[in-house]
Amino acid sequence: MAEMASTKAIDYESIVVSRPFRFVVGAKKREFMLHSEVVSRLSRTLNALVNGQMREAREDCAIWEDVDEDTFIRFSKFAYTGDYDAAQPRLVVSTSDVEETIAELPFSKASIPSVSSGDRWSRGDTPPSPAEPGNEGWGGRVPSPSSPPAPMSSGTLDLFCIFVQPYMSKDGWGSWSAPPIHNREDEDYTEVLLSHARMAVFADYHGVSALETLALKELTFLLAAFRLWESRVDDVANLISYVYESTARLNDSACGLRKLVCQYSAYKMEVLWKSAEFKQVFRTFVEFSEDLTDQLLKRL
């Protein structure tokens, strides 16, 4: 069956008059309803699910407990629009940062000055004002906005970016320039990276090649522009773990996702190898170690 047609070629009448198909998704068994026509046109596998001889087609219901709700919602948006929204980064705030901020507040216990009997003011008097940011006052310092930390690399296009440009052109992704994501050190991008990887795994399983290509493209673009802070190597380590837990080798070669994370790791090895989490992933997944070694040898 042909892949999803372009937006202009879609027969919307055939979609809206088609019967509803129910999906029971995730551990909580949340129910979603999609038009059967919009699902069936995505791939041969999904067409058989909706219109074939299986029980799901007879009951107009499929139970997908192994698919998380967010991934299914992204799949649903792609089914209707040809695109999906990735997860958003999470702001990381450490306990020490919170305690330090509280200690520096002008009205915190640590910063309230002791007042002797001779220094008291009566009702109607104007109490002393807190100091300007950066100056001392009321026994403590009012914190001033901090400047963003200096980037690890001043170049927009590093070795990895230069490497993936011909790779993407070869795969028919067209011309490319680094997207300005400007990720900060205090942002956790684990779920952002995983949202694309989960879509690629889901699409591969259900034969939706257009969605798999889109997910790989979005993940490649993100990694190419991603500023790899030493303190955020865990984001990449979590991505690699998921990829090697959720995919398999094909004919002794790495699949698209495996190839991508290994190429990225090879070109970021100097930073990644400083992380204990990355070293743990390297020791845990033998196939990752072998695939990464192959990529590193190509750099020699």
Image: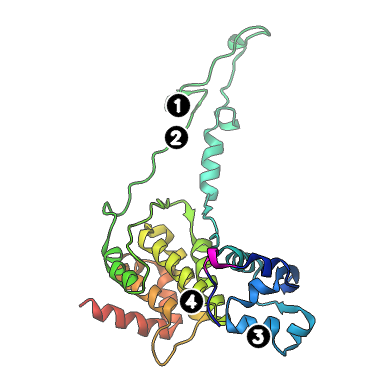
- Is 9 covered by the magenta stretch? yes
Look at 61% across and 65% down and name the residue there. 80
The residue that disc 3 covers is: 48
Spatial separation of the CA atoms under disc 2 and disc 4: 39 Å
Pointer 3 or 2: first along the chain = 3
Q: Quadrant of residue 9?
A: bottom right
Q: Residue furthest right?
A: 59
Pointers 4 and 3 in contact (C-beta within 8 Å): no
- Please say if the residues under marks 2 and 1 sit with CB atoms less than 8 Å apart: yes
Q: Residues within 10 Å of mark 2 (few under 14, many from 20)?
A: few
- Position in image of residue 37 (x %, y %): 67, 73
Camera-near label (3 vs 2) is 3
Q: Amino acid at mark 2?
A: Pro
Q: Which stretch is magenta?
A: 6-10
At label 3, the amino acid type is: Ala
- How far apart marks 4 and 3 lie (CA) works out to 27 Å
Task: Determine the residue positioned at 40% across, 84% down.
Answer: 254
Q: Which mark is residue 145?
A: 2
Which-is-in-front pick, marks 4 and 1?
Answer: 4
Name the residue carrying label 4. Answer: 243
Which label sits on residue 133? 1
Which quarter of the image is occupied by the N terminus?
bottom right
